[in-house]
Image: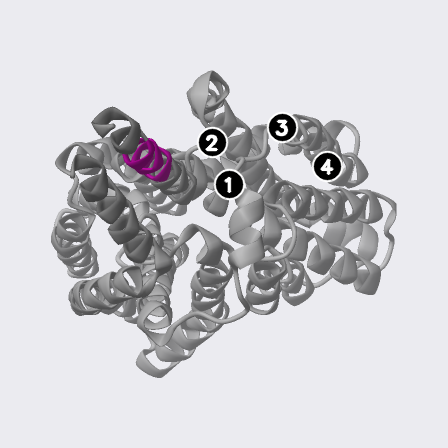
Amino acid sequence: MVRIREAPGWREAGRFFKLVLRRRADESGLIGSGSEGAILQGRRWFILAVLFAARAVTGFQFQSIGSSANALMQDMGLSYAEVGMLLGAYLLPGAVVAFPAGLLGQRISDKTLGLAGLVLMALSGVALSFGYGFISALVARTVGGAGATIVILVATKMTTDWFDRSELVLAMSLLQMSWPFGAMVALPIQSYLVQSMGWHAVMASGAICTAVVFGAFALIPRPAGQAGAQAEGGARLPVAVLIPVLVAGTIWGAMNLACVLFFSYAPMLLAAQGSTPTVAASLTSLAIWFTILAIPTGGYLVHRSGRPITAIILCGPIAALALMLFVADVHPTISCLMFGVAIGPLSGAILSLPAQVLDPRDRSLGLGLFYTCFYILMAVGPSAAGRLQDAWHTPSAALIAGAVLLLAMVPLSLAFVALTKRLIPSARARLHSSPAPRRLARVRSASRAGHH
């Protein structure tokens, strides 16, 4: 009799704990269960390669205007201001598109949303290759920028889903390399195309590369737990989650804006200090290369240490110090290298922050808000820095502003930590208010009854 009464209780307990483990696997971004889940999880680095290519093609397409600027000005009669508008039109849609794209990601799969973004990018490339007027080119660039925003958002979201927290910083660092990699690959290829075949071929090359990535992106499997997460996801984030996400997005925007200001105004400052244009461009290019190399290296070191906040708090002030030394004309070459090395670990560390507070069902919406903060800062920051430069009558003004942005990441990171600590007790409260603990109590009661 003891065995007969004991078995049902333990069987129910076993079923319950299997259900809990399966649900935890789904919530942590694991893919299915059993041998199929292990096989899919083993493909995550291949999937990261596809996401890398998708994000790289956004950099490739962005560079198409810069690579063919002279030809566009000759054939279409564009001014420098209009070329600048075409460049900015690729980034400005992000401030408007990122949040709706994140909201839409709550309802449709990441794969479908990413493919839609790639379609917009391909259409933009085709339209630009056949365009002959400034207005049509501006519209096409805006459409392509909207598609690129969607692709970048989806790539970040899918990387967060496919990699656990122990690997996330390294994965994000590798993903972050993709945009500058695409832009730098575009420079020699598009320069050759514009000289041999004209600017139409440059625009078409962006569409062709996007089509190739589209085919690879379509082969990405869908995480098994995503449908349930989308069904549970709502259109609102709790305030306790919303504020840390906005803080993280501000940190990400501040770091990228500081880099843009350095790469834009460093050559001007070097020229004002007496360097030749060739030397000025070479030093800035050297800093860019060191940044690109430092991103995966720094990401690996942060991955090994497991302390992204510490990396932000240490590397932000070091990069700010490098900028101030550069402004003061103290060993400009060493200052450039120091800046590039210090910036490297920041990318993966910052991009891993949203995953610390976002549940899988809220990641699409949360990352939409995260990137909205980023794009707003990127939209208004360069203009504000230009006005500051006009007021101070020196290129060093923008670089000092960049140093202030990098220093501001320290209190923002500490605020993120404080907000996250406040979030932990509320998460525990939600856990205890859920039906799972009550179900566990019933299982334990049944198990005790089996022993009597």
Q: Is residue 392 left or right of residue 45?
A: left
- What whole-number distance in Å separates the C-alpha atoms at marks 2 and 1? 7 Å
Residue 429 x %, y %: 25, 66
- What whole-number distance in Å separates the C-alpha atoms at marks 4 and 2? 39 Å
Q: Which label was assigned to residue 225?
A: 1
User: What kind of residue is marked 1?
Assistant: Gly
Which residue position holds label 4? 202
**Magenta run includes residue 312:** no
Residue 309 sits above or below residue 286 on the image = below
Q: Are marks 2 and 1 in contact (CB under 8 Å)?
A: yes
Question: Which numbered disc, 1 or 4, marks the residue closer to the eye?
Answer: 1
State which quadrant residue 209 falls in.
top right
Which residue position holds label 3? 189
- What whole-number distance in Å separates the C-alpha atoms at marks 4 and 3? 9 Å
* Residue drawn at 19 percent across, 55 percent down: 316
In the image, which residues are magenta?
Answer: 8-17
Q: Earlier in the sequence, mark 1 or mark 4?
A: 4
User: What kind of residue is marked 2?
Assistant: Ile
* Residue drawn at 13 percent across, 51 percent down: 310
User: What element does badge 2 sit on?
Assistant: loop
Magenta stretch, overall SS: helix
Image quadrant occupied by the C terminus: top left
Viewer-nearest residue: 419 or 139: 419
Residue 324 sits above or below residue 26 on the image = below
Q: Earlier in the sequence, mark 4 or mark 2?
A: 2
Which residue position holds label 2? 31
- What whole-number distance in Å separates the C-alpha atoms at marks 1 and 4? 41 Å
Image quadrant occupied by the N terminus: top left
